[in-house]
Image: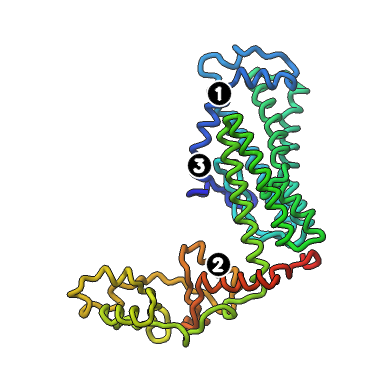
Amino acid sequence: MFKSFRVGSVLGIPIRLDITFLLILPVFAYIIGAQVELLLDLLEPVIPNEIAATDLTDGSLQWGLGLAGALGLFLCVGLHELGHSVAAMRYEYDIESITLWIFGGIAQLTDTPEHWRHEFVIALAGPIVSIILGGVAYLPLLVLDWPATVTFLLAYLAVMNIALAAFNMLPAFPMDGGRVLRALLARNRSLPRATKLASEIGKLFAVLIGIFGLFTFNIILIGIAFFVYIAASGETERVMMEAALRDVRVDDVMTAADQVHVVTPELSISDLLDRMLAERTTAFPVVANGSPIGMVTLTDAQQVQDFERDALEVRDVMSRELHTIGAETDAMDAIVQMQEASVSRLFVVDRHGSFIGLISHGDLMRVFNIMQQSGDWERVRPGDR
């Protein structure tokens, strides 16, 4: 997803809109408005009373219907994601946010469900909400006669919610159906193995969805297929990494301070370049009085003119942006922190802020590769979840 911003909260869950949502909303509104007559023909079997197309296309009415239909559809998508969130909260999982974007919505849990039954219920909750919303939209049509515009909108939302539930139940991990599949596979398999199998099935469905989208010239389906394929790969890697690094702490992986080449802020740029050449490294942590104060790289040093390199010191060019982590922190949290800060290493400090080591993305990847080769990523068994 791209940049998003918060618009409110429901049940304490932040609701966010991705910038792509603002781009796709008018597109959806236009498509619905431009196809009112075609949609009316498709909805005719579920509309109790006959509606004339002219009742929906008079003046600019069809464009108003398009906007109302698009807003109503995304509202239902938000409620679908809220269904996932409420089910997750029942099992005491925290919800980071619900975000609406170009391909619908995402309820972001802070943790992967610990038991297969939890994931099974959480994954089903969204489609169940969509089915209920479809019924809620359709029942009024059976009870009362409504104006043509209201009848059209209710019928449209009823059908779209049922279609949304059905589409989401395709076993294309990480869509809802794919998560249901993973939950069922995890009954007698480790989580990583269940995820890997569900991911492969999900990629197959992504390819099929993409091919169908190409033949029908449906850009949205092509985009969804691409997203499902990429997300399935990313989820598999994340779960396998979580399993491999389970119970591994930062101090199990880090390079201890006495093995880290550091520089002081008083070192001249000329001497810094000599150190880089001698020690074959392009970056040094900067430490003063036992505490980290920054990082200096070859790029920083190269910005200094030749005639200034003896006069200027490391403190004059170093980056003062510090990213620190505690030694007892889980190794997986270190990866998350690196990703969020877009850095490749973290300073490891004790409770007093003293520098005790350095942990890099490469350190974590080496441990992950060793665990994977040894089969230790299989340690998470169904009984553990």
**Position in image of residue 141 (x %, y %):** 74, 23
Give the mark nearer the N terminus: 3 vs 1.
3
Residue annotated with mark 2: 335
Secondary structure beneath disc 3? helix
Q: Mark 3 highlights which residue?
A: 20
Q: Where, quadrant-wise, is the C terminus in this rendering?
A: bottom right
Task: Name the one closer to the observer, 317 or 217.
Answer: 217
| Residue 112 drawn above or below residue 39 | below
Using a 10 Å C-alpha cutoff, classify the residue at mark 3 as few (fewer than 14 neighbours), some (14 to 19) or many (20 or more).
some
Q: CA distance from mark 3 to mark 2?
A: 27 Å
Q: Does the CB distance between marks 3 and 2 fall below 8 Å?
A: no
Tag 3–tag 1 contact (CB < 8 Å): no
Residue drawn at the location 38% of the way across and 81% of the way down: 279
Residue named by callout 1: 33
Where is residue 286 drawn, in percent x and y? 38, 79
Amino acid type for the residue under numbered disc 3: Thr
Between the residue at mark 3 and the residue at mark 1, the CA separation in whole angstroms equals 20 Å
Mark 1: which amino acid? Gly
Image point (66%, 69%), residue name: 372
What amino acid type should be assigned to the residue bearing mark 2? Answer: Ile
Going from the N terminus, do you reach mark 3 or mark 2 first?
A: 3
Question: Between 204 and 263, which is closer to the camera in this rendering?
Answer: 204
Counting from the top left corner in percent of width and height, residue 145 is at 72, 18
Secondary structure type for disc 1: helix
Q: Does 230 sit left or right of 46 as displayed?
A: left
The reply to whether callout 2 and callout 1 are in contact (CB within 8 Å) is no
- Asked whether 114 or 79 is in front, the reply is 114
Q: Residues within 10 Å of mark 1 (few under 14, many from 20)?
A: many
The answer to whether residue 218 is above or below residue 184 is above
Q: Residue at x 65, y 51 (%)?
A: 11
